Amino acid sequence: MSILSVKEVTYIYKSKYQSVEAVSNVSCSFDTGKVYAIVGHSGSGKSTLLSLLAGLDLPTKGEIYVYDKPMSSMDRDRYRRETASVVYQSFNLFPLLTALENVTYPMELRGVPVKEAKEKAKALIASVGLEERIAYQLPLMMSGGQQQRVAIARALANNSKILLADEPTGNLDSANGKIIIDLLEKLAHEKDYAVIIITHDMGIADRADIVYTMKDGKLKA
Ligand SMILES: Nc1ncnc2c1ncn2[C@@H]1O[C@H](COP(=O)(O)OP(=O)(O)O)[C@@H](O)[C@H]1O
Ligand SMILES: [Mg+2]
């Protein structure tokens, strides 16, 4: 059974003046241990689909299942704390917290004792290939590539099995982009994450195990 199954999902943005069908009758599934790339032009519905996979919103029609459990019946805040993590193009680190504090934060929310959380955060920071001194720096003092690695370490801090990334290399040069993709690939293949990457970058798509293309809200394999 797949960790995520999308069944005939449609999402419509409704406003007073218009409604936009951003995702149209999409069905697909995602397994652990694999890297998925979702590619497509701007406006094709990729970010909307990702927010549905992240449980930030519910489909207008259809259902997303986490194993056999419908997302609509789940505590989705808990789903985001325990099952799925999202990494964004703009890193989204807390600017006033050090790298260590950024990574410790989700564990503190879960009630992990401070000392244990700090130890685990240090190990996670090392596991994404950052030097120990980075742990004590504020995001502003780090390069984009370093910030994205901290963001990934923070995503890993919640023990989730699903890693969702929206243009994770969009603000990085190609060398740093490659480091991030190497890391995401290792997480899928060695740590059994389901890694789902939205990207414009065909170089990333080439390295994915499975590529889905989105066009006008529709998905094809
Ligand atoms: N908050 C919103 N309100 C209304 N329409 C939206 C909103 N967000 C996105 N859209 C529309 O939904 C479609 C898909 O957008 P999006 O999922 O962001 O695509 P992508 O990530 O592929 O660029 C676009 O037509 C976009 O204009
Ligand atoms: Mg987008």
Image (cartoon, rainbow, N blue to C red):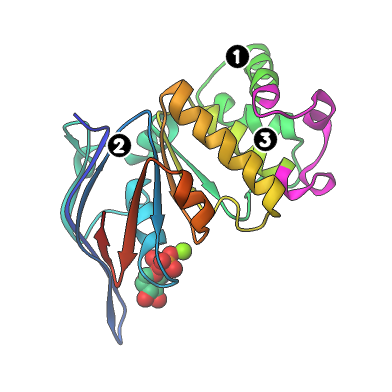
What residue is at 77 percent from the left and 44 percent from the top?
Answer: 139
Which residue is nearer to you in this view: 112 or 12?
A: 12
Task: Determine the image quadrant of residue 123.
Answer: top right
Q: Secondary structure at mark 2?
A: loop
Q: Amino acid at mark 1?
A: Pro
Looking at the rendered image, the disc whose residue lies closer to the viewer, 3 or 1, is: 3
Q: Earlier in the sequence, mark 2 or mark 1?
A: 2
Which residue is nearer to you in this view: 182 or 67?
A: 182
Residue labelled with disc 2: 75
Q: Earlier in the sequence, mark 3 or mark 1?
A: 3
Look at the image and tell me in which quarter the C terminus lies.
bottom left
What residue is at 81 percent from the left and 32 percent from the top?
Answer: 134
Give the CA separation, mark 3 to mark 1. 15 Å
Give the CA separation, mark 2 to mark 3. 24 Å
Q: Residues within 10 Å of mark 2 (few under 14, many from 20)?
A: few
Marks 2,1: beta carbons within 8 A = no
Q: Which residues are magenta?
A: 125-145
- Whether 134 is among the magenta residues is yes
Image vertical order of residue 34 relative to residue 21, above or below: above
- Whether 47 is among the magenta residues is no
Residue labelled with disc 3: 102
Marks 3,1: beta carbons within 8 A = no
Q: For disc 1, does the CB lie below 8 Å from ligand 2?
A: no
Residue labelled with disc 1: 113
Measured as percent of width and height from the top left, residue 209 is found at 38, 40
Q: Amino acid at mark 3?
A: Asn
Q: Earlier in the sequence, mark 2 or mark 3?
A: 2
Q: Amino acid at mark 2?
A: Asp
